[in-house]
Amino acid sequence: MVYMKQKNRHPLIIGTLILTLTGLVSRVIGFFYRIYLSRLFGEEGMGIYQLLSPVLALSFSLTAAGYQTAISKFVAERSAKERSPSLRPMLVGMSISLPLSLLCCAVIFFFSDFIAVHLLLEPRCASMLKILSFSVPLGAVHSCVNGYFYGIKKAGLPAFSQLTEQLTRVGCVYAISAYAFSRGMVPTINVAVLGLAAGEFFSMIVSIASIYCCSLKSRAASGCGPLLPIYGSILGMALPLTANRIVLNLLQSVESVSIPAKLRAYGYDTSTALSVYGVLTGMAMPLIFFPNALTNSVAVLLLPLISESYALGDLRAVKQSALKTIKYCCILGFLCMCGFSLFGKQVGVLLFDSPLAGHFIATLGFICPFMYLDTTLSSILQGLGMAGRIFIMNVICLLLRLAFVFFAIPTFGITGYLWGMLASQLVQSVLYLGCLYLFLRRAEKENASL
């Protein structure tokens, strides 16, 4: 009976529970970490720190994101068909991802001054970029390993890796800051970037140790068949995903760099513009994204589950998983919208001592139902092999948001950008739902005709 109960457990539910609990713990730590950083470095310091986000996101997209997704998908498919996990997709993906990440690390390190002055429009980012560059290859390794574990539906090890990264990051920053204060020195925002790199390092160590132990205890093996078909399969999925994410991240980078510039066009000085940007992206948005720990966990595990069901021709399982996910994401989003809208202003003052953060939280609460839904719908569509359509829809929504950045912010200030976020998330939800509906309807017709 115990065995039967264990067999009946749904891997999505178990994996989601593991990832969600770890994600919530990690986000609680990260949330208070953000509060600590905002009080330690101020609103302007947070604004400068947030300018690094486009570089980090772009480097991750170039070197790791597409390969992690491809590894997860093909490990899941091979496990479903061969009834045993294989390390070969992970090793092939890593053999491509790691050299790319080393090249990216070198470019960021040696061209940090150019990137800071001409691309981020903030010379104070140069020294931070040098430190940040070392995190790129570290992140690529543990992303590939995580892709393997997601593919075999063992979410515990990536979850532990994520928690290790967060604890190391926070502990490193706190220890260095405490040491600096004890010596009568004032720590700079560079400390936060150093903590980020340290977190990636220890996360990589945990990932490597996990995959080594897993390969010893299980029957997972690298095999001895030809590698060329695996390279073709991994690259066939990873390259379009990578290209898509690079284009999207370039657009997001333009958005991130343009917001402070357009705020200056609205009438703010440089310090005020960076402070407003820092409050929005470093204080308000992390709180809005906090409940997304649940939807992110579902999304990560939905992709291999949907891929496996679709590969086996089980359209009914695909439809049931999608409908249940949509239902619960809408409920979560509605509850969060009500909470943030009603109590956002008080929360902003209480946690960040910032009325502006409270205003942002209350306003951004309205995007929660659409944002949480979009996260999981994107994963479902990827699992069904519609990465190209996702890319087109995401570009449309980003261009819409950029239009608000360039034309609404100079006239209405940061409020114009908040309107743009709401409009883009709403349009994205409609497009994703329409695409999924048409796919399922066409697939049902094809099955009925057979």
Image (cartoon, rainbow, N blue to C red):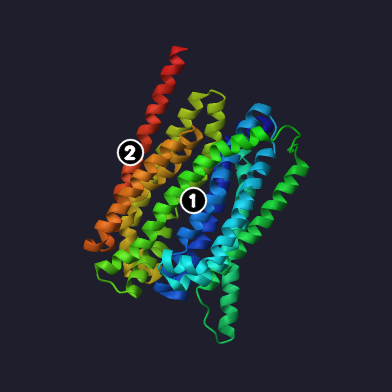
Q: Which residue appears at 57% of the width and 69% of the height?
A: 194
Name above or below for residue 444 compared with residue 210: above
Between 5 and 299, the residue placed more toward the observer is 299
Q: Residue 151 placed where, x, y %? A: 61, 39
Q: Which residue is mark 2?
A: 430
Q: Residue 133 placed where, x, y %? A: 57, 63
- Mark 2 residue crowding within 10 angstroms, few (<14) / some (14–19) / many (20+): few
For the residue marked with disc 1, what is the amino acid? Ala
Q: Which residue appears at 55% of the width and 61% of the height?
A: 107
Q: Residue furthest right?
A: 216
Q: Which residue is mark 1?
A: 293
Q: Residue furthest bottom?
A: 184
**Residue 328: which quarter of the image?**
top left
**Residue 353: which quarter of the image?**
bottom left
Between 381 and 285, the residue placed more toward the observer is 381
- Mark 1 residue crowding within 10 angstroms, few (<14) / some (14–19) / many (20+): many
Is residue 167 in view? no
**Residue 174: which quarter of the image?**
bottom right
Q: Earlier in the sequence, mark 2 or mark 1?
A: 1
Q: Which residue appears at 38% of the width and 62% of the height?
A: 257
Name above or below for residue 438 compared with residue 169: above
Q: Residue 90 placed where, x, y %? A: 65, 42
Name above or below for residue 189 compared with residue 413: below
Q: Residue 14 placed where, x, y %? A: 58, 41
For the residue marked with disc 2, what is the amino acid? Val
Could you say whether the residue bearing mark 1 is in a helix, strand or loop? helix
Direction from residue 385 to residue 275 in the image, left or right? left
Direction from residue 257 to residue 172 in the image, left or right? right
Q: Quadrant of the N terminus?
A: top right
